[in-house]
Every structure is written in structure tokens, then in C-alpha cells.
Amino acid sequence: MVEMMTPQWFEDDNGLYCFDIECPGIFNAKEEEADSIYHLFGNKLEWLMDCTFIKGTQSDKDLIEQNMAREFERTREELEHHKKVTLSATVDNELLRTELVAKDKVLSFGKEIIDIALQGGDADGGCIQELGVKHGSLLEDRYESAIHGEKGRREGIKPETN
């Protein structure tokens, strides 16, 4: 009778803990448990010469290739997921950094306005505008006649310079 090795489950004890591991073996009906490759061939494979090897069939080879392809695809999907998570974290970090920079600009602008008030000063519109531009919380708008018209020129928007 020819018996073939099939995947079997064995308890593996590494000295710290035990876990189940799948490895080649032959189910021993008499003992009602599987014999591992080490039971069959010895720990140093010294009984290997007692065995007859049977060449695998094309369906065996196809099954091995399918398993390898599935494992390759699983690994590729894990790498793609890792790339997406890394990219997502990078984008999130960049958005957070941009948000923090914007908040810092507004806070430094507000702090200086409050300092003026605490020192008994009074910040007029021009002062507020200058401080806002200084701290980057306001942007200076250049005059463009197509957008601002004559009203913008009267309100003090700086004229275009060509």
C-alpha cells in the first residue's frame, strides 16, 4: 500500500510556549494520529533511504503553482495596502502640518493684537491689516480692474504693476 504525505497538524513546543503547526505527515490509523516527517524519516532524515519517491502528477504541479500564485497575490495585496496606509498617513501628516501652520499664523496674529490692547493701544484697520499680512493670516490683494473695478481703487487696493 502506498501512502502519501499530506498536510497534517502537529503541536510544536519551542521551550517557551506551544502552538500548532502544519507540516507534511501521514495519518497513522492504528495510533489515531499523524506521523510527522520527523517520525517517518528521523530527526536527521536518516531513514529517508527506506522510502520510494513517487513523481508528482501534473495536477499536483498545478495545485502547487496555484498555491504559490495565491500566496504571491496575498503578499502583493498586503504590500499595496501598506503603500496606501503609508501614503494616507503621509497625506494626513501633510494636512495636519498645513493646518497647524495656519493656526499658528492666526494665533501669532491674535497674540500681537491682544498685546497692543493690553498695552493700552488701539489697533486701527491699517494696523490690523499690516499685522495680518506680517503673520501670514491675511493676504495682500493686488488691484485688478476686471475684478475690483473702480470701487477697489477707491478702497485702497494697491494698483497693478506691469
Image: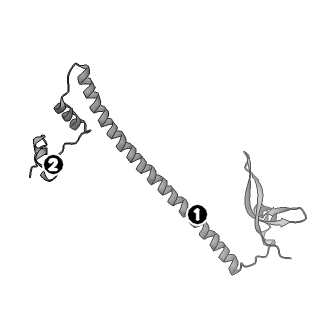
Within 10 Å of disc 2 (Cα), the crowding (few <14, some 14-19, many 20+) is: some
> What residue is shown at x 33% (from left), y 40% (from top)?
101
Within 10 Å of disc 1 (Cα), the crowding (few <14, some 14-19, many 20+) is: few
> What residue is shown at x 42% (from left), y 50% (from top)?
90
Residue 27 shows in this picture: yes
Q: Residue furthest top?
A: 120
Residue 156, compared with residue 27, is above or below; it is: above
Q: Where is residue 153 in the image (x, y as percent from the top left)?
A: 10, 44
Residue type at tag 2: His
Quarter of the figure that contains the N terminus: bottom right
- Depth check, front residue: 40 or 66: 66
> What residue is shown at x 54% (from left), y 63% (from top)?
76
Q: Where is residue 32 in the image (x, y as percent from the top left)?
A: 88, 62
Q: Name the residue under label 2.
A: 148
Badge 1 element: helix
- Depth check, front residue: 90 or 72: 90
Q: Name the residue under label 1.
A: 74
- Depth check, front residue: 143 or 101: 143
Badge 2 element: helix
Residue 137, picture quadrant: top left
Residue 33, picture quadrant: bottom right
> What residue is shown at x 22% (from left), y 42% (from top)?
139
Residue 66, compared with residue 39, is above or below; it is: below
Q: Disc 1, disc 2: CB below 8 Å?
A: no
Q: Where is residue 28 in the image (x, y as percent from the top left)?
A: 86, 65
Residue 9, compared with residue 142, is above or below; it is: below
Question: What's the CA distance linking mark 1 and mark 2?
Answer: 59 Å
